[in-house]
Image (cartoon, helix red, strand yellow):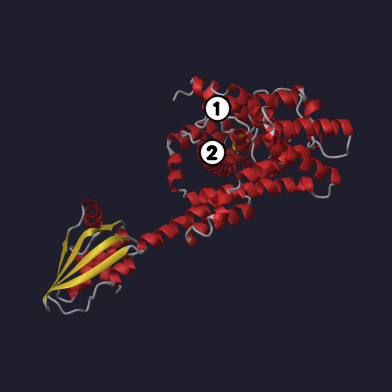
């Protein structure tokens, strides 16, 4: 489908407009908070969120997904900003964009095929927990007014949709923010508001080339950070795209999303913003509020900028309790509650992968490490499972003279020992026939195991015949086997 098709832009104008406004309101405190985490001025996060959301609306591969400055990315910038300053962060942001575009052209999004459903579920649950934990500072050491406002906000969010007619036409998070802001302004209660998070910018962003020396020394400083930002940014974006795919039952072009994220980050860096990526929390807010097309993402970015620059006095009056209520709704909606129910019926290996992904992600606050551990565990469990699918039977064709072995299953590094142990290498027999017609040899380890069996039989004076090798297995065996090469045989068996 065309990037500028009517369906991708104007098929849901009302829903996208309202959801975009809700997302813009929720983005403001997050962008400021993430700027504070990274150690930069609040406007760096706000400009980044505007630039990334607007650019990704045109260049991304997933309509309805929200990209902006994120906490996962902000955590990776802390050391760079502390040691080298903002200009180097802007340079690293530009390099991150270039690397992400390269990743898109190399089709690295295809690697998402290796991320199992249990890893995605663990990732989602970990993010839900992290989103909730991020709200706790706003709920500790505060007066009862904050708790009352937060509970009132949650009440509006969950009960408003039940109102006839109006309940379905206006997103309840938007109603929550408007009502609680009005209550806060009328009552004058002493609770934290958006204005207390940091000073909002009063000018539009301008083109800004990072003032860093263009030399190798600068490259070596920013490259490690750019690589980490690239990996985490793409991982979070691909995972979020997968989740939005599921929520909307629509496909997405993940390689185009990689390139789009790269272009958006280059735009952010040139406008004085930090690197960002897709945001699962804001994307869920958008979808739950009725956003579906690219228009919702564009409106979120434009409204965000207009509000912080031209309506700063009003925006600064939004109580944090209202936004905490919205984010708690997001964490509850994001968490896969079915995964807890499924713990009883899913295999223990699936549960371990999911729980390990959650535990590592939450403990390190690093999505990349959590996903890496999950993928690694899933691969190990899979290799072990497939390695056990191996049967080797034997029958005596002629007593004391000839025996046939039938190999059925997958032979690779995880099953090579079982394969070797199934042969009686000490049996006094003239000929051994090994039927491999229902076996598949996958790697060098499997071929070496076959080599040892053939060589050891031959050393006992037994003739060995291999039959039935499939074309795929024969390619691997012919390339790496050495049992017909006398010199290689001596070298292989010399240590044994």
Which residue lies at the image location 18% right of the left edge and 77% below the top edge?
460
Q: Is residue 439 left or right of residue 344?
A: left
Provide residue 441's location: percent of width, then percent of height: 28, 58
- Given residues 365 and 397, the one toward you in this image is 397
Q: Earlier in the sequence, mark 2 or mark 1?
A: 2
Q: Which quadrant: the N terminus?
A: top left
Which residue lies at the image location 84% right of the left edge and 34% below the top edge?
184
Q: Residue furthest front?
A: 164
Provide residue 458's location: percent of width, then percent of height: 17, 72
Kindly indicate whether the residue at mark 1 contacts the one at mark 2 (C-beta within 8 angstroms).
no
Could you say which quadrant of the image residue 308 lies in? top right
Label of residue 247 in the image = 2
Could you say which quadrant of the image residue 443 lies in? bottom left
**Does any portion of residue 340 appear in the rendered image?**
yes
Which residue corresponds to mark 1? 293
Which residue lies at the image location 80% right of the left edge and 26% below the top edge?
314
Q: Nearer the viewer, mark 2 or mark 1?
A: 2
């Amino acid at each position: 489908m065309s990037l500028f098709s009517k369906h991708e832009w104007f098929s849901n104008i009302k829903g996208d407009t309202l959801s975009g406004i809700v997302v813009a309101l929720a983005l403001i405190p997050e962008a400021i908070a993430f700027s504070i985490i990274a150690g930069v001025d609040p406007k760096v996060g706000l400009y980044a969120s505007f630039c990334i959301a607007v650019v990704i609306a045109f260049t991304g591969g997933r309509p309805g997904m929200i990209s902006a400055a994120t906490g996962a990315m902000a955590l990776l910038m802390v050391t760079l900003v502390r040691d080298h300053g903002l200009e180097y962060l802007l340079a690293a942001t530009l390099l991150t964009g270039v690397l992400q575009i390269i990743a898109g052209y190399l089709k690295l999004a295809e690697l998402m095929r290796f991320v199992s459903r249990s890893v995605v579920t663990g990732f989602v649950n970990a993010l839900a927990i992290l989103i909730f934990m991020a709200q706790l500072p706003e709920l500790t050491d505060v007066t009862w007014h904050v708790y009352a406002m937060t509970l009132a906000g949650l009440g509006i969010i969950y009960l408003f949709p039940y109102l006839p007619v109006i309940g379905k036409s206006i997103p309840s998070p938007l109603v929550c923010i408007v009502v609680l802001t009005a209550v806060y302004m009328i009552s004058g209660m002493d609770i934290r508001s958006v204005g207390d998070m940091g000073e909002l910018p009063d000018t539009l962003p301008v083109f800004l080339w990072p003032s860093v020396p263009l030399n190798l020394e600068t490259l070596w400083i920013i490259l490690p950070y750019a690589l980490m930002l690239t990996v985490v940014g793409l991982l979070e974006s691909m995972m979020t795209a997968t989740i939005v795919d599921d929520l909307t039952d629509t496909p997405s072009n993940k390689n185009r999303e990689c390139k789009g994220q790269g272009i958006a980050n280059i735009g952010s860096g040139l406008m004085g913003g930090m690197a960002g990526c897709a945001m699962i929390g804001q994307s869920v807010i958008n979808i739950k509020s009725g956003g579906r097309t690219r228009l919702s993402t564009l409106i979120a970015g434009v409204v965000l900028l207009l509000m912080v620059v031209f309506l700063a006095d009003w925006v600064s009056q939004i109580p944090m309790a209202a936004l905490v209520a919205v984010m708690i709704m997001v964490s509850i909606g994001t968490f896969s509650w079915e995964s807890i129910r499924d713990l009883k019926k899913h295999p223990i290996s699936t549960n371990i992968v999911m729980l390990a992904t959650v535990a590592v992600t939450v403990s390190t606050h690093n999505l990349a490490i959590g996903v890496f551990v999950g993928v690694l565990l899933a691969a190990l469990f899979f290799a072990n499972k497939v390695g056990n699918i191996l049967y080797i039977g034997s029958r005596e064709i002629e007593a004391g003279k000839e025996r046939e072995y039938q190999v059925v299953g997958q032979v690779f590094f995880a099953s090579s020992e079982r394969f070797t142990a199934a042969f009686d290498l000490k049996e006094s027999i003239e000929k051994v026939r090994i039927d491999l017609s229902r076996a598949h040899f996958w790697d060098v380890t499997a071929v070496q195991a076959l080599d040892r069996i053939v060589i050891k039989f031959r050393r006992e004076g037994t003739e060995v015949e291999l039959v039935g090798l499939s074309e795929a297995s024969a390619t691997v065996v012919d390339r790496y086997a050495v049992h017909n090469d006398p010199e290689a045989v001596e070298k292989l068996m010399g240590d044994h």
